[in-house]
Image: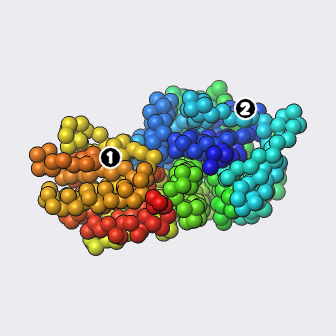
């Protein structure tokens, strides 16, 4: 397959799709009907899990250099702080929210693509497409009116809430409009406001939330009550925003130098299936929801990462189109459902109008916020570390241990490790960074016979599925080179025994890790026949 995959839409999701496909050496072509990238800040937060995936493209450092790290968030009511949430985590080297305007996110992705020789084709519009079963025939129109017919093995619609691709497929975008009107203001703010935290103020007239962007620049979002049937004004003035902030905020805040002022309404909609034949939807083309929690852009970018490695396996002739493509919608649609529910729940809680409901909220939230388990749940949901694919057709296990803290389908936990031979310390994700599946071998002991059997198992699997696996051995921290001679694969010390503990690896254990960092399969005690049977479900053996 040498014909490029066609990506429609060059927002952050389409650009991520192109970058991820390029990472796997899959040819792609990306078009957009706009004349230039957006200059609006739009989505602000890039969460931990997205940063981990960007790190696989060697992009994370550029994002960190450009954005602003947040450390926490607070909710206030009646002049009192109800709860404070620490927004840092040791679960990842990117354990913090990164605030970076969407236009800057797009700039970094465009810069990356340009370095790879990929350019967005601007003012090129999709007119129609036909899925023949063997390919997708598309008619494109150029700004001079010229039309071109192109055939592509797959089309990915990343063209936003008003997706031409979705409309062409006749896919229903089910959901509803959230009942309130809102206003948004990207402005400079002077006064008693934390510059590295999200601050949310609940008031009897509504909510005002402040999100730091950089220096003294913030985004303020306020609800305006029930929408009704009226049309929102076309322009929002700074004095109107200042008045709302004075009423609902902490007092003493002065707004100036507005960069973006707008009224908006929230829609919560989603397609039931992200795929139809050889055409896939990603990002806002598949799901839109309340900005509460800042999950929208991140969810779309993770759609792209999820799909890219599956298309790559098919492109390389190493993976079976089914169930790989089927799994895309099953996995990501379930995530989309959860994001919709959480965003709607948070929006509803923030916009309560009933005095009784507000009183209950303001008294229950501090109690719940006093429990570490509740804070950890909220933080992991926001960071998107709790996303799992346990019900995916690409997930399996043959597991006799009682350890269930981390299961097949979960994100692999990152942890500090050190090279057995050199002592160089790094983290697990950096060490196994690859565009292939990773086979992690955890012997559980330094018994020479067990270690030999485990490495022989890995060698057999690599011979049957050539170029599909990258193998690493994880040893206990007290292991020394002289006790494990002649290893055929990179060997690492589990510095604080995290992996051995989480997987109760007292017996030879193996983990098969997908290219996107989720555990596809776990097996204990390690058995080659069980591993090969699972790999046969979606990978292709050497002929």
- Is residue 47 visible to us here? no
Instruction: Please indicate whether residue 138 sits to the left or right of residue 381 in the image.
Output: right
Q: Along the polypeptide, which appears first: circle 1 or circle 2? A: 2
Q: Residue 19: where, in percent of width, then height? A: 56, 40
Give the Cα separation between the discs numbered 1 and 2. 39 Å
Which residue position is annotated with label 2? Answer: 36
From this viewpoint, is residue 451 visible?
yes
Q: In this view, does 435 lie to the left or right of 422?
A: right
Quarter of the rendering containing residue 131: bottom right
Residue 309 point in image, percent of width and height? 52, 51
Residue 196 coordinates in the image, percent (x, y): 45, 36
Question: SS for tag 2?
Answer: loop
Task: Look at the image and name its color scheme.
Answer: rainbow
Q: What element carries label 1?
A: helix
Q: Residue 446 carries which label?
A: none
Instruction: Give percent across and percent down for residue 311.
Output: 57, 53
Taking the view exactly as shown, the residue that stands out farthest to the front is 543
x 48%, y 35%: residue: 59
Residue contact at pointers 1 and 2, CB within 8 angstroms: no
**Residue at 25% from the left image edge and 56% from the top image edge:** 455
Residue 46, relative to residue 118: is it above or below? below
Nearer-the-camera pick, 67 or 394: 394
The circle on residue 428 is 1
Please report the residue visible at 21 percent of the width from the left and 52 percent of the height from the top.
475
Q: How crowded is mark 2: few (under 14 residues within 10 Å), some or many (20 or more)?
A: few
Q: Observer-nearest residue: 413 or 543?
A: 543
Which residue is the extreme one toward the left? 482
């Amino acid at each position: 397959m040498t014909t490029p995959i066609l990506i429609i839409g060059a927002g952050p999701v389409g650009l991520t799709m192109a970058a991820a496909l390029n990472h796997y050496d899959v040819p792609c072509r990306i078009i957009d009907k706009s004349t230039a990238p957006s200059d609006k800040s739009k989505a602000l937060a890039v969460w931990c899990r997205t940063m981990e995936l960007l790190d696989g493209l060697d992009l994370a450092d550029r994002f960190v250099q450009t954005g602003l790290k947040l450390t926490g968030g607070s909710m206030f009511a009646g002049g009192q702080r109800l709860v404070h949430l620490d927004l840092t985590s040791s679960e990842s080297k990117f354990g913090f929210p990164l605030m970076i305007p969407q236009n800057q996110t797009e700039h970094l992705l465009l810069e990356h693509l340009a370095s790879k020789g990929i350019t967005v084709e601007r003012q090129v519009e999709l007119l129609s497409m036909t899925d023949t079963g063997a390919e997708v025939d598309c008619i494109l129109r150029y700004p001079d009116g010229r039309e071109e017919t192109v055939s592509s093995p797959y089309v990915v619609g990343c063209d936003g809430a008003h997706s031409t691709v979705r409309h062409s497929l006749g896919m229903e975008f089910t959901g509803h409009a959230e009942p309130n009107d809102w206003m948004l203001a990207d402005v400079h703010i002077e006064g008693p406001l934390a510059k590295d935290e999200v601050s949310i103020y609940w008031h009897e007239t509504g909510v005002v939330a402040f999100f730091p962007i950089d220096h003294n620049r913030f985004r303020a979002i306020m609800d305006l009550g029930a929408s009704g049937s009226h049309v929102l004004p076309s322009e929002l003035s700074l004095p109107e925003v200042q008045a709302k902030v004075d009423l609902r905020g902490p007092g003493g805040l002065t707004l100036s130098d507005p960069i973006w002022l707008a009224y908006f309404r929230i829609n919560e909609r989603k397609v039931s299936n992200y795929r139809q034949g050889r055409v896939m939807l990603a990002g806002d083309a598949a799901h839109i929801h309340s900005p509460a929690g800042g999950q929208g852009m991140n969810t779309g970018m993770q759609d792209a990462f999820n799909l890219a490695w599956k298309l790559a396996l098919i492109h390389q002739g190493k993976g079976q189109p089914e169930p790989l493509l089927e799994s895309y919608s099953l996995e990501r649609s379930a995530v989309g459902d959860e994001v919709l529910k959480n965003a709607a729940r948070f929006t509803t809680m923030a916009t309560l109008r009933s005095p009784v409901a507000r009183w209950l909220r303001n008294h229950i939230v501090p109690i719940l916020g006093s429990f570490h388990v509740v804070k950890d749940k909220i933080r992991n949901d926001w960071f998107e570390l709790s996303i799992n694919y346990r019900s995916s057709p690409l997930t399996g296990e043959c597991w006799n241990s009682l350890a269930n803290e981390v299961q097949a389908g979960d994100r692999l936990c990152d942890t500090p490790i050190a090279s057995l031979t050199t002592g160089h310390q790094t983290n697990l994700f950096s060490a196994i960074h690859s565009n292939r599946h990773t086979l992690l071998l955890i012997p559980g002991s330094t018994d020479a016979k067990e270690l030999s059997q485990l490495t022989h198992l890995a060698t057999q699997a690599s011979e049957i599925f050539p170029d599909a696996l990258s193998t690493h051995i994880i040893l206990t921290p007290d292991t020394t080179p002289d006790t494990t001679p002649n290893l055929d694969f990179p060997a690492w010390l589990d510095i604080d025994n995290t992996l051995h503990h989480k997987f109760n690896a007292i017996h030879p254990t193996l983990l098969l890790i997908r290219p996107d960092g989720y555990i596809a399969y776990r097996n204990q005690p390690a058995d080659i026949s069980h591993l090969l049977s699972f790999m046969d479900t979606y990978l292709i053996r050497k002929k």
